[in-house]
Amino acid sequence: MKKKIVGSALSVALGASVIFSGGISKSSAAPVDKEYIVVFKYQSQLPAGYEKLIKDAGGKVTGKLDKLGAVEVSSTNTAFLDKVKKSNLVLDAGVEHTIYPEKPVYQEAVTLDDITDGADVYKNYQWDIKQVTNNGASWNLAGGTGKTVSGDDIVVGVIDTGIDYNHPDIKPNYAYGKSFVPGYPDAMDEDGHGTHVAGSIAGKGRILGIGPDLKVAAYRVFGPTGGAETAHIADALMTAADDNVDVVNMSLGGYDWFQDPEYATKDVVADVRLFNRAIQYAIQKGVTVVGSAGNNGVDISSPGKLAGDDKGAVHRSPSSQTMIRVSAGGALKNLAFYSNYGVGKIDVMAPGGDLGPNYDPATKTGRDNSYLCYSSVPGGYSGYAGTSMASPKTAALAGVIIAKYGKDVLKPAQVKQIIQSSAEDVFKPGYDEKAGFGLINAVSALK
């Protein structure tokens, strides 16, 4: 089972505008010069003497995350980890992993010729936005569009591939953009994923988002080649918190395979610790953090079971208990066939799209593209399916809830509680492993 889910110690991908369609091969290649993450015991600062410690272990500091108590290190010393872990200043250390986006497998472009009789994309295609807003009824409630009485902007940070800020449906609500991709200072989306996410949140034009008056800010971590170091994503999340955004959407998905059989399932590698610290940093600064559940169609509640016959454990990451974790549903309020699930791992379900009730994942027959989630992409519109499409709708719901009460009034835990308690039961009464507390509903949440 583990081999179907992960290949190396950490293989993380956008949780994405894709439906998982195959295994990830295990890599045994080990470069001479490696990049590492060193996480110190102090969570809010780097300890005195850390540079000497790294140097004495044969490493060179290449990046600092002062507020998270961690550094990036480059070293050619094969014994670097053994040496650095001996220090009582170090909580954990490990190889820093590169994160790659999964490319869309199921998508359908919309051409303007498809839109006839003066109708718009929202009317013809966006069943998912209608499902969450009760056909737009939530937009008539206080805060429902994302506009506050005070006039303060409610900003949703999108940690992703960037945003096409020139797209006519995004431009009115684009706040700003920052890039964490070395050599690419512009936050412009060159993939499509981030723009699709942004449209689901705050689209205002031919498409409509859950909160058409919310603002979106791009925190670009993926460049045209698709790779991103863990530290850059953590840095983006930390920066978004410092910028006082109200919500962050992380449509990221991955798994950690602990190959050392001596690891207990409660243990985590350095990358996971860094992710969790960044999430906690944001939440403590008042940011509601939302993330996708993943597209492998598996139960992620048991690390031991995910490992199958292999010794060790497989963990979903990032997957902090304090963030809001979202599974994906279809137009018929079903759990999408690709969506991960699991007791204690899912908080709510939101529309992520699928290929219709007649689609057979085994034979790949019976596909109906009208069940995909349609939104903006650079140069136009497209339908995607994935938990990445479910997460931003929940992030947008968090945004309109905050808009109702006012900026910096509610704590993230209060926002999460409102989203959970107002969700619609769609499977078992109360909490269940597929939808968590239920399918999100903006009207119920705002009432």
Image: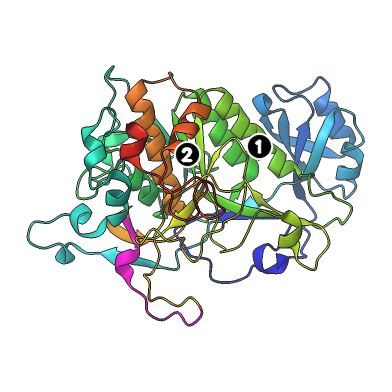
Which residue, given by chain and number where applicable, does mark 1 sit on? 276
Where is residue 42, by image quadrant? top right
Q: Quadrant of the C terminus?
A: top left
The answer to whether 426 appears left or right of 322 in the picture is: left
Numbered tag placed on residue 388 in the rendering? none
Using the image, determine if residue 430 lies above or below residue 335.
Answer: above
Residue tagged 2: 420
Mark toward the start of the polypeptide (2 vs 1): 1
Q: Name the spot of residue 332 as percent of width and height, x first.
A: 35, 62
Instruction: Please tell me which residue is depicted at 66% across the width and 37% down the height of the picture.
Output: 276
Image point (37%, 35%), residue name: 445
Per the rendered image, the range of residues in magenta is: 362-374
Q: Three-letter amino acid code at disc 2?
A: Gln
Q: Does the magenta-highlighted stretch encompass residue 363?
A: yes
User: CA separation, marks 2 and 1?
Assistant: 22 Å
- Closer to the camera in the image, 447 or 63: 447
Circle 2 residues within 10 Å: few <14, some 14–19, many ≥20: many
Q: Position of residue 20 (x, y in %)?
A: 53, 66
Which quadrant, please, contains the N terminus? bottom right
Q: Residues within 10 Å of mark 1 (few under 14, many from 20)?
A: many
Element class at badge 1: helix
Q: How many marks?
A: 2
Q: Name which quarter of the figure residue 330 lies in.
A: bottom left
